[in-house]
């Protein structure tokens, strides 16, 4: 456990926007000029709206291919972002990416139920994978994804962009440096108001579950990276109005408590019926607060007794969390290193989420396996 804590502490402190400095100048010089090629699978809200526009901010990554079920959209996006026609694929001919040497990494931006299949097919086609969160529908699927990438000798990273977000990194650094004394309590509330009842996120077969799979996972992740500890037990309670057409299949509110080995208590709330995005870390000498904590932008951070001391972290080399994430995996490929948020990290969260669901169902504390 202590080795793991040290590893997490170090990689987080060194990660993200400043990851380049962790590699060393000579290694970087050897790979200078080579940009790693990404194929984006799924041109939806996240892939098209957030990720594709970020390649212009990357140093080591470039967009070389698109995989979409909509040929007209793919053609339009390809023209806009300079992707050659030979780099356009659909879900039927997806496996032929194996014949495209420009594609190094496949970024899976699909509904959760498709993550395992498209990750495993990418690995079999000889490509590294960046897969969106939550990693998959179940821990069993996560294990199969890890095994497939390992067997193919390919890297697997999960799209946990907050590990590359300067305000989160600054909060972690200050907590580790003891600025708020001994940690006692972590609290995080994450939620937004779900809309269309027919959306895939509200269909259990496609999402794997409700708010915790989509948004509460940020609270869980933050509990782990802010404390630098792994929870040993969970206790959860679900509150869902099953008459609401949005929540026939998945949960709305789920509250979960995490017990950490040091005695720190983590208290997390996940919801699909209110907007909230906050992290609070309390120590015996003060508190660290982030709000919003894990949004795409606009983070604010306070360190002290309350909100009197607002902190703006020093700017890194100009990369935001999205570009930092893309370039991190690109650098891992160039340098043959393991990403700081590998498949195992996604699997851990899914195992904890499974225990959270079990706890809510059985109304009892569930111990987590080490
Ligand atoms: P979306 O619904 O906007 O896009 C999904 C894409 O998958 C669309 O292009 C759609 O056409 C395609 N698709 C292919 N087959 C499909 C099918 N059978 N049913 C539905 N869509 C199908 O979703 P999104 O918001 O882009 O989410 C995609 C992934 O990205 C999810 O895993 C989600 O959790 C993740 N995500 C991550 C973040 C983050 O901040 N890291 C933010 C948003 C979404």
Image: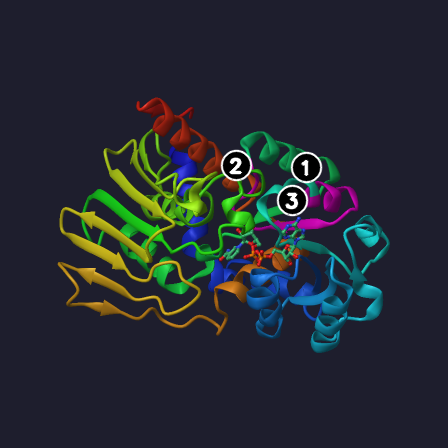
Residue 29 on the magenta segment: no
- Identified at 60% across, 49% down, the residue is 111
- Can you tell me which quadrant of the image ligand 1 is in? bottom right
Mark 2 lies on residue: 347
Quadrant (top left/top right/bottom left/bottom right) for the C terminus: top left
| Secondary structure under the numbered disc 3 in the rendered image | helix
Q: What is the quadrant of residue 230 in the picture? A: top left
| Secondary structure under the numbered disc 2 in the rendered image | helix
Query: From the viewer's perspective, is residue 50 above or below residue 352?
Result: below
- Decide which of tag 2 and tag 1 comes sooner along the chain: 1
**x and y percentages locating residue 69 in the rendered image:** 74, 57
Disc 3 from disc 2: Cα separation: 16 Å
Check contact, mark 2 vs mark 1: CB within 8 A.
no
Mark 1 lies on residue: 150
Say the numbered circle drawn on residue 114.
Answer: 3
Residue 123 on the magenta segment: yes
State whether label 2 is within 8 Å of ligand 1. Answer: no
In this rendering, does residue 283 appear at all? yes
- The magenta segment is 118-137
Q: Nearer the viewer, residue 229 or 241?
A: 241
Of tags 3 and 2, the one toward the viewer is 3
**x and y percentages locating residue 225 in the rendered image:** 38, 47
| Secondary structure under the numbered disc 1 in the rendered image | helix
Q: Nearer the viewer, residue 44 or 132?
A: 44
Disc 3 from disc 1: Cα separation: 19 Å
Quadrant (top left/top right/bottom left/bottom right) for the N terminus: top left
**x and y percentages locating residue 251 in the rendered image:** 41, 40
């Amino acid at each position: 456990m202590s080795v793991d804590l040290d590893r997490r502490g170090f990689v987080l402190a060194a990660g993200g926007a400043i990851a380049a400095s962790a590699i060393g100048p000579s290694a970087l010089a050897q790979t200078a000029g080579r940009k790693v090629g990404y194929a984006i699978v799924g041109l939806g809200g996240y892939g098209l709206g957030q990720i594709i526009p970020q390649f212009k901010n990357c140093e080591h990554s470039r967009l070389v291919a698109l995989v979409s079920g909509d040929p007209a959209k793919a053609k339009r996006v390809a023209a806009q972002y300079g992707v050659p026609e030979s780099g356009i694929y659909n879900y039927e001919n997806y496996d032929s990416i194996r014949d495209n040497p420009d594609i190094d990494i496949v970024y899976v931006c699909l509904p959760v139920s498709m993550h395992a299949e498209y990750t495993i097919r990418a690995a079999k086609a000889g490509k590294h994978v960046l897969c969106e969160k939550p990693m998959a529908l179940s821990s069993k699927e996560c294990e199969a994804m890890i095994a497939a990438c390992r067997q193919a000798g390919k890297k697997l990273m999960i799209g946990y962009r907050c590990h590359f977000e300067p305000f989160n990194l600054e909060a972690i650094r200050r907590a580790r440096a003891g600025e708020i004394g001994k940690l006692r309590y972590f609290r995080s509330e994450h939620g937004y108001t779900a809309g269309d009842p027919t959306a895939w996120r509200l269909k259990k077969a496609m999402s794997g579950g409700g708010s915790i799979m989509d948004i509460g996972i940020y609270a869980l992740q933050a509990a782990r990276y802010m404390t630098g500890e792994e929870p040993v037990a969970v206790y959860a309670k679900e509150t869902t109005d099953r008459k609401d057409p949005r929540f026939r299949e998945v949960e709305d509110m789920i509250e979960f408590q995490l017990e950490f080995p040091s005695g720190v208590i983590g208290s997390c709330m996940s919801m699909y019926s209110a907007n909230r995005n906050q992290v609070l870390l309390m120590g015996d000498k003060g508190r660290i607060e982030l709000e919003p904590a894990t949004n795409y932008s606009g983070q604010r951070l306070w360190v002290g007794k309350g909100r009197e001391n607002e902190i703006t972290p020093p700017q890194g080399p100009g990369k935001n969390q999205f570009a930092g994430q893309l370039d991190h995996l690109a650098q891992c490929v160039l340098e043959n290193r393991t990403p700081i948020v590998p498949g195992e990290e996604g699997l851990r969260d899914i195992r904890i989420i499974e225990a959270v669901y079990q706890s809510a169902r059985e109304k009892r504390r569930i111990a987590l396996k080490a």
